[in-house]
């Protein structure tokens, strides 16, 4: 069995996908690289087939009609045979030094009592034009280099486990019936969020595995692009609310972490709606908070009256300006968008 299946969702990625694939090939026969061509109109499909022909025991090329990033991840998961599963976007890459360390550690955990459900590693914001690369690490909130459970997980604002940092056990993703919505951006939050209640054992490696390229003008996380696609962000946000509201008997430490995660997503959605400056989007923000209130009054009360909930719901136009100014400072500090 392959140790790690790696899905590469690819849409019109001819200009940068080779760097991504080449960074993953050193995994050799321990890995399975699944390049999902999501209905591309350039040479993405040709490049995927080229690598599959050259490395038939390592690379798979999957071709499908355009279904969006989420459906490409779904296709990768459907075709995965490895014990663990990771998503690497086609414009990102993995670190040549950390990658073999991660594979060796995963292999060492197989077959014993410490098979983990989730591995977490650090990632780097490779932002265009940035002189210093921001490293997102978890050494102050997770135990390092050993198996642990939810009661040892700390929560720090701005240091959430994201798709870039996570490797899941493949069977667990299937057990939790993970299926991301089609033609929807920002589903990476769902990819991480939905399986969390099924996670029992975790392992954190304090290495910078993932290089997250950010700064292209057409990139989905470009702020103006996000505002233009705000309805998709709201859709994902509401799906996360539904997941959280319907959980029963959840480990209290896991619940605390998931509530904090939902808190930051509510904040991001709200701030983007405020930054757009339109009355229509302000009403969408109000409606999003009403949706949370109707789904789970207790959850709404905790998030709405927390620090972030209060910060993005300050009254009046003056309050909106203060909220946006605070958000800009946070952006600068954490280096996102």
Image (cartoon, rainbow, N blue to C red):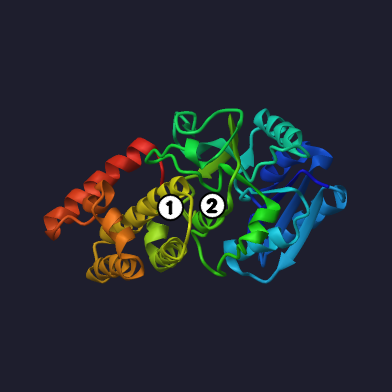
- Residue 43 seen anywhere in this rendered image of the structure: no
Q: Is residue 326 left or right of residue 56?
A: left
How many other residues sit within 10 Å of disc 2, few (<14), some (14-19) or many (≥20)? some
- Specify which label sits upstream in the sequence, 2 or 1: 2
- Foreground label between 2 and 1: 2
| Circle 1 residue | 222
Instruction: Assign a secondary structure to mark 1.
Output: loop
210 above or below 97? Answer: below
Q: Position of residue 168 (x, y in %)?
A: 64, 48
The circle on residue 196 is 2
Q: Residue at x 39, y 52 (%)?
A: 259
Query: Which element is circle 2 on?
Result: helix
Residue 322 x/y as whole percent? 18, 49
Q: Position of residue 141 (x, y in %)?
A: 45, 33
Q: Nearer the viewer, residue 222 or 81?
A: 81
55 vs 279, left or right, is right
């Amino acid at each position: 069995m392959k140790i790690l299946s790696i899905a590469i969702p690819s849409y019109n990625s001819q200009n940068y996908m080779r760097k991504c694939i080449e960074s993953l090939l050193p995994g050799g026969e321990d890995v399975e690289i699944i390049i999902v061509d999501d209905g591309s109109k350039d040479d993405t499909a040709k490049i995927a087939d080229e690598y599959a022909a050259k490395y038939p025991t390592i690379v798979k090329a999957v071709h499908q009609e355009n279904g969006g990033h989420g459906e490409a991840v779904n296709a990768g998961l459907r075709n995965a045979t490895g014990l663990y599963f990771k998503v690497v976007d086609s414009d990102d890459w993995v670190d040549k030094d950390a990658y073999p360390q991660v594979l060796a550690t995963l292999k060492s955990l197989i077959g014993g009592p410490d098979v983990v459900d989730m591995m977490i590693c650090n990632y780097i914001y490779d932002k265009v034009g940035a002189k210093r690369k921001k490293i997102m690490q978890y050494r102050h909130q997770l135990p390092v280099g050993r198996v642990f459970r939810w009661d040892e997980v700390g929560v720090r604002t701005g240091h959430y486990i994201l798709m870039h940092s996570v490797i899941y056990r493949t069977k667990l993703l299937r057990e939790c019936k993970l299926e991301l919505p089609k033609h929807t951006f920002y589903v990476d939050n769902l990819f991480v969020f939905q399986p969390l209640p099924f996670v029992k054992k975790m392992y954190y490696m304090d290495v910078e595995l993932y290089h997250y390229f950010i700064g292209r003008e057409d990139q989905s996380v470009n702020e103006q692009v996000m505002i233009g696609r705000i309805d998709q962000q709201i859709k994902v946000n509401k799906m996360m609310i539904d997941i959280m509201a319907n959980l029963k008997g959840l480990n209290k430490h896991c619940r605390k972490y998931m509530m904090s995660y939902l808190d930051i997503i509510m904040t991001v959605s709200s701030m983007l709606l405020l930054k757009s400056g339109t009355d229509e989007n302000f009403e969408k923000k109000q409606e999003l908070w009403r949706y949370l209130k109707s789904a789970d009054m207790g959850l709404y009360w905790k998030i709405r009256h927390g620090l972030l909930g209060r910060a993005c719901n300050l009254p009046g136009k003056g309050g909106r300006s203060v909220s946006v100014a605070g958000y800009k400072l946070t952006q600068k500090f954490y280096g996102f968008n």
